Amino acid sequence: MKIGFIGLGNVGGKLAGTLLRNGFDLTVRDLNPDLEKAFAAEGARIGAKPAEIMQDVDLLITCLPSPAVSAAVMEGDDGALQAMAPGKIWAEMSTTDALEVCRLGEKAAAGGAEPIDCPVSGGCHRAASGNISIFAGTGRSTFEKVLPVLTTMGRRVLHTGPLGSASTLKVMTNYLASVNLASLGEALMTMRRAGIDLNTTFEAIRISSGNSFVHETESQVILNGSRDVNFTMDLVVKDLSLFQAIADRAGVPLEISPLLLKIFEDGQDRYGGREWSTNIVRRLEAACNDQLLAPGFPAELVDDEPEVAGHEVVARRS
């Protein structure tokens, strides 16, 4: 299968790298020519316009920072939609709005192609190792066609239902991760100000009912001081806004979500949209005139699990 990959950023570059490392025929495109050249040096081809890439490949993957950018790649001058045809598959791996991916998916299907939304979850360090989780929303026949590609990029692949279902679930999981991040900052600072050693605090959380994936990963780079999670404030604000919109459409009167969105909007205003999301703790550090730092933690996250073949996760029904 010939694959095109548009978007070689923090996540996309690592997913595309996994495909290249595993021998797939890959054509790449990014606005940053240095990223393209790095892939070309490893054997990938550099594509030009999205329509031309779509015409030359069987599967086009997009992994882009916002719904607006995805729409531009698909619908703009020489956009990929112009080359949709029977036998082609478009896989949207961006974290995006379910309504928007369905709108673009309808246009892709009108040209005879098969659309699928398949965002990832688990952090950039797991995207790099091929051990990330992937949600996939599409018909079962399309899912089975792309499953060998998805199980190369990820360890656990969940067929979530029709197009758009994966994007809906993805922003929900990002909401939960952001709740974890904000609450961990409060917990760590409260323990710090209460005189509890932060290394001990980390272990107490890790072995307790308060533990979480976010704690085991992001708390480490918070305490190191690097705060490097390869995920930025503006992306959190985008994802929280998408989750809130889902709740609003469903008539769910959320209480935590609006407050959390205000917290991260304030963080974005204070520190900039491209600041690491973990630096939301700087708000508390400033308020308390103190720092969340402890020795012995890594500056960046590395997946120390070996790369293994992925598999489909099947939801329990009984």
Image (cartoon, rainbow, N blue to C red):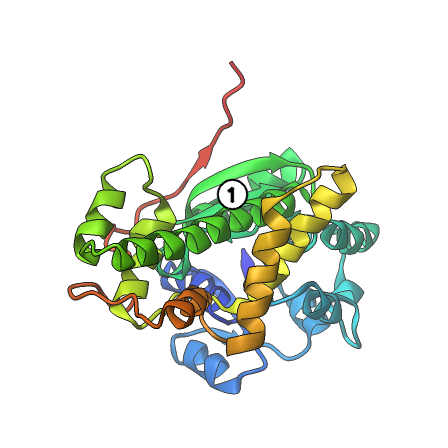
301 up-or-down from 148: above or below: below
In this view, the residue in front, 138 or 188, is: 188
Question: Hey, what amino acid is under mark 1?
Answer: Leu
- The quadrant of the rendering that contains the N terminus is bottom right
Q: Can residue 281 be seen in this view?
A: yes
**Residue underneath mark 1:** 147
Q: In percent of the image, x 32 and y 42: which residue is there?
A: 211
Helix, strand or loop under label 1:
helix
Q: Where is residue 104 in the image (x, y as percent from the top left)?
A: 77, 56
103 up-or-down from 280: above or below: above
Label 1 crowd (10 A; few <14 / some 14-19 / many >=20): some
In this view, the residue in front, 299 or 260, is: 260
Residue ranking furthest to the bottom? 33
Query: Left of 22 or right of it: where is 64?
Result: right
Q: Where is residue 247 in the image (x, y as percent from the top left)?
A: 70, 42
Residue ranking furthest to the top? 318
Q: Position of residue 275 (x, y in %)?
A: 48, 75
Q: In percent of the image, x 15 and y 64: which residue is there?
A: 296
In this view, the residue in front, 26 or 134, is: 134
